[in-house]
Image (cartoon, helix red, strand yellow):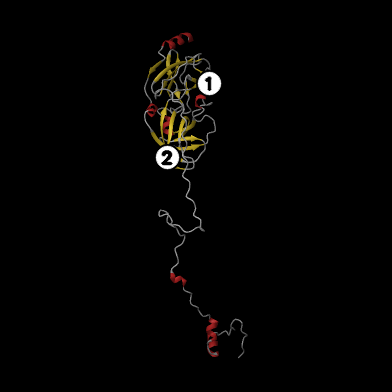
Amino acid sequence: LPLLLLLLLLSLPPSSLGQNSQVADWFGQTIHGEGTYYSYNGDGGNCNILPVPSWAVGMKKAAMNQAQYVGDNESEGCHLCIQLTGDGTGSGSNPIGSESIFITDRCPECAYGDIDLEGGLDGRWGIDWIAVDCPVGDTKISYTFQGSHEYYMKLSARDLRVPIQKLEFMNDGNWMEGTRTNDNYFLATGFSFPASLPIMVRLTSVAGDVVTDTIPRISNGDRIPGGNNVQFAGISGGSSPTPTPTPTPSPSPPSPTPNPHSPASNPPTNTPTRRCNPPRSPTHNHPRPHRATRHELARTLPRQARRAFNPLHIPAYGQAHQSR
C-alpha cells in the first residue's frame, strides 16, 4: 500500500496553482509602519525556526505585528523575508536604516505594519517595507517534527522561498488538510494512524503554488530534507540576495550648552527663557514700617497712665520692678 500511494503521489504534477493568501499581496506593495527593537535570545521565536537556516544567518531576525503574523490562518506571517528601510522619522538613540529581515516571531502589541527588530536597541522609527523572496538559492524544502510518533504528527516546513499557506497529508488515498497552529506547525488531525513511511505531503504557498513531497522518517527536532527536492516558485522574480545595509544615520547632536562666562549672545527666538517664579513687584522692595512694641509705648506715658496701661505692674524687659 505505501508503494502504491507513493506511485500515485509521483504521478501528480509537482507544481500547480491554488488560491492566494493576503500575504502574497505584501510582495507587491510598500507597507508603512513603525520599527522598534527587542532583545532576541536565539530561541527561535513564536515561529519555532531553530536553528536559523544557513541562508538567513546574515539577516536580521524580527517579530511581525499580531495582525500580519496571523495572516489568513494562525501563523501565516512566519518565514517571511522583507526588505525594510527607515524613513528618517521617529525618536530614540538608534535610527533604523536599510535592513534585510527574516520573520521568526510575533509582536502582540504592535499595530498593523509594525516590525519589532532584534538587537535590544533604542527608539521608535518610521519604516517602509515590502515582502521579497527568501534568498534560499538552491536549497530545497525541509521539515521538522515536534513531539511526533507513528500515532501523532506535528510538522513544520522550513527553507521556504515564500511562506506556506496550507499543508496536507496523504491519508488512505486522500489529501487531508493539516490543522495549522499559532507556532508555525501543522497537526495531522483526523489522520488514520499509525502513520506509514514515507510521509506524503502537499504544500501550498501563499501565492497558490502547490508542490508535493515525501518525508522519509519521523525524527523530532531534526531538519529533514524532503525526498522530492522541491521548492516554491518565487513571487518577486526569484530569490533576493541579501543587500548590503546602508549606513545608519546618526541622531542629531544636541545643541551646545552656552558658557556663562563667555560674552552674551542672542538667545534663539524659538527657545524662550523660562523663569521658575515671576519677578517681584517693585512695591515689595520698600522697607516695612517699624511698629512700636507695648513696652516702648508704655515708656512714653506718665507713671499713673503707665499703671493703667500695665495694671499688673509687670516691669519692662531689662528694668527692675519699682515700688510705690
Q: Secondary structure at mark 1?
A: loop
At x 53%, y 21%, the residue is 223
Task: Identify the amino acid type marked 2.
Answer: Gly
Closer to the camera, 69 or 305?
69
* Quadrant (top left/top right/bottom left/bottom right) for the C terminus: bottom right
The x, y position of residue 232, in whole percent, is 43, 20
Query: Residue 69, can we see it?
Result: no
Q: In this rendered view, identify the residue nearer to me: 50 or 246.
A: 246
Q: Is residue 316 left or right of residue 90?
A: right
Q: How far from the left and from the top, in percent, is residue 147?
A: 54, 23
For the image, the number of numbered tags is 2
User: Horizontal placement of 55 versus 18: left or right?
Assistant: right
Q: Amino acid at mark 1?
A: Arg
Give the x, y percent position of residue 205. 41, 22
* Sequence-wise first label, 1 or 2: 2
Residue under the point 48% across and 35% down: 117
The quarter of the picture where residue 133 lies is top left
Closer to viewer: mark 1 or mark 2: 2
Residue 19 in the image, given as x and y percentages of width and height: 36, 22
Q: Which mark is residue 88?
A: 2
CA separation, marks 1 and 2? Answer: 40 Å
Q: Residues within 10 Å of mark 2 (few under 14, many from 20)?
A: some
Residue at x-position 52% and y-position 84%? 297
Q: Is residue 12 above or below residue 302?
A: above
Few, some or many residues within 10 Å of mark 1 (<14, 14–19, 20+): some
Q: Residue at label 1? A: 223
Figure check: 204 above or below 244: above
Asked if residue 209 shows in the view, the reply is yes
The numbered dot on residue 64 is none
